[in-house]
Amino acid sequence: RHRVSPEAQAVLQEYLTDNGLDTVKVRLNQYAPGGEWRRLVKNKSVGWFYRYTFGALSLVFYTILPGRLFGGDHYNPFTNTVNIYSDDPGILLHEAGHAKDFARRKLKGTYALLRAIPFVPLYNEAVATNDAIDYTIDKQQPAAQKDAYKVLYPAYGTYVSGEVAAWFGGPFSYLESLAVALAGAIPGHIIGRIKAAHVEDEPAPRVEPQASQ
């Protein structure tokens, strides 16, 4: 939508603060190739070999094909940047979840490169999706939890169908690609709405333990 509301920004900022992700850069509907190349050089948490090969390649695509026109919300581990173009809090939490996932990895470059192995991205996406949903549960935000189920489950379905198609099918025409995406999204929509329907509108009150006498 290329418009990120203050409410969505506040959700993202609170998540980053709660998880101590103070080195993560967030770009809201922004195209900044110069800044990203500088972050690539300075991001010593990723080994230089990974930064100046795979990281540089990712920024070549970023520079030539601006995300505002050709891409979507994503996290770049080589620059430790979350790029946001959407206004849905669930999507924002998901992308920030990738940053949290990488923050706890010791070999970040290797971990990023593993995504080239078939079906490994499904693990990465599941980690970020589950973290986003768990965060709404921990914060006792049923409305946000429902939204996350409805948005992130269909998205994950497209990841599944996309991986299957990438490694066992193709090349596809436009209509075939659309059919592949729908084959994953439709079950995701169904499951997501079933999960959302079971979320109580009011969170259960917390029971504080009584101090021992």
Image (spheres, rainbow, N blue to C red):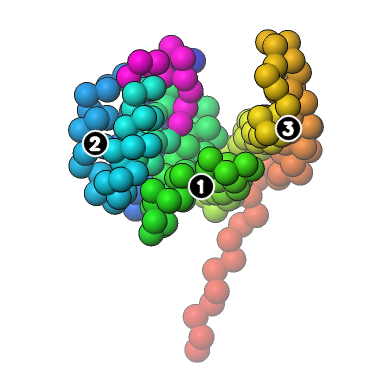
Where does the image place residue 119, in percent across and percent down from the top left? 64, 43
Residue 38 in which image quadrant = top left
Q: What stretch is highlighted in magenta?
A: 63-74
Instruction: For mark 1, give the secondary structure.
Output: helix
Q: Which of the two discs, 1 and 3, sits closer to the camera?
A: 3
Please report the residue visible at 52 percent of the width from the left and 42 percent of the height from the top: 115
Residue 128: x and y, percent? Answer: 54, 44
The three-letter code of the residue at mark 1 reads: Leu
Label 1 Cα neighbours within 10 Å, binned few <14 / some 14-19 / many ≥20? some
Between 38 and 99, which is closer to the camera in this rendering? 38
User: In the image, is 91 to the left or to the right of 59?
Assistant: right
- Please name which of the two marks, 2 or 1, marks the residue nearer to the observer: 1
Whether residues under marks 3 and 2 lie with C-beta atoms below 8 angstroms apart, the answer is no
Residue bearing mark 1: 114
Question: Label 3's element?
Answer: helix
Q: Decide which of tag 3 and tag 2 comes sooner along the chain.
A: 2
Instruction: Give the labeled residue for mark 2.
Output: 39
Would you say 115 lies left or right of 38 here? right
Point out the tag, 2 or 1, that comes first from the N-terminus.
2
Q: Which of the two residues, 196 or 78, is positioned nearer the viewer here?
A: 78
Q: Identify the amino acid type marked 2.
A: Arg
Residue 25 drawn at (x, y percent): 30, 37
Classify mark 2: residues with Cα within 10 Å, few (<14), some (14-19) or many (20+). Answer: some
Q: Name the residue under label 3.
A: 168
Whether residue 190 appears in magenta in the rendering, the answer is no
